[in-house]
Image (cartoon, rainbow, N blue to C red):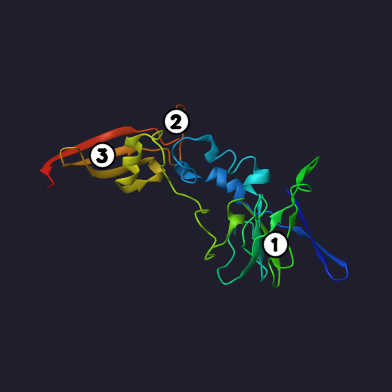
Amino acid sequence: MKGITEIELTDVRTGEKEKYTETNLVTNAIADFFSHNIDGMLFTINGNTSDLYGNMLPLCPNGIGGILLFSDTIEEDPDKYYAPSANPCVGYASNDVNATTNIMRGSMNLTETKRLDNGYRFVWDFTTSQANGTISCVALTRKWAGLAYMGDTYNGTNFVWVMRSRSANSSGQARTAHINAVEIYPENNFLWTIGLNTSNELVIQKVRASFTAVGLNDTMLGNNYDLLVTIQSPLQIS
């Protein structure tokens, strides 16, 4: 992929415009998202298709449907995905229109943003009261990250949930296995858990999980629970 950024500044008093055009480095973030997403940890585990489709796919305008503006430049390294914490974020925007009072957040131009024959064009608008400051770096991000930034009072719950469960669609046994996990062996695709049964007896289990290998029948939805070993202690916890 190849990216081109054009910043157009308009003097609201005179109408005079200034344009700045630069080419962009495309990092390995998207490729690594799909190849290094061990055990589907970046998705909720209830199996709802909206966890992936609509949040990340299609990539335009979801997976890369946000923008971040920084005060300082960022090193152009395809393996570096995050801006240094010392680099102030001037503004941001998502793939929607900002209807809040957040003066750091701009709005996507829903008319000019569209699919092209050879790619996709994003257009974001910032009013004179939004994203004020020095802008030395522009970076694409996913749509949720374009709603806020780390340390921002508007951040809400827009960050990634790790193995979040919110529905009975996820196997109760699968949820318990991840909650009770004490040792994990990604290279061998199993984990050890320690928990209690309904009689308050200590139970140690070895559970198979799709960390680095996916079987033909694995769904990656958090419903798989392949029990390999169970050790039940006669000790009762009271």
- Whether residue 120 is visible to the viewer of this picture, yes or no, is no
Residue type, numbered disc 3: Gln
Figure quadrant of residue 227: top left
Vertical side of 223 occupied by 138: above or below: below
33 vs 218: above or below: below
**x, y percent for residue 21:** 81, 61
Which residue occupies the foreground of this view, 110 or 198?
110
| Residue 86 sits above or below residue 8 on the image | below
What residue is shown with label 1? Answer: 138
Read off the residue under disc 2.
218
Alpha carbon of mark 1 to alpha carbon of mark 3: how far? 48 Å
Residue 133 is left or right of residue 33, and the answer is right
x and y, in percent, of residue 234 in the image: 11, 40
- Mark 3: secondary structure: strand
Give the residue type that dot 2 points to: Asp
Q: Name the quadrant containing residue 75.
A: bottom right
1 or 152: nearer the eye? 152
Mark 1 vs mark 3: in front: 1
Q: On the image, numbered disc 3 is attached to which residue? A: 205
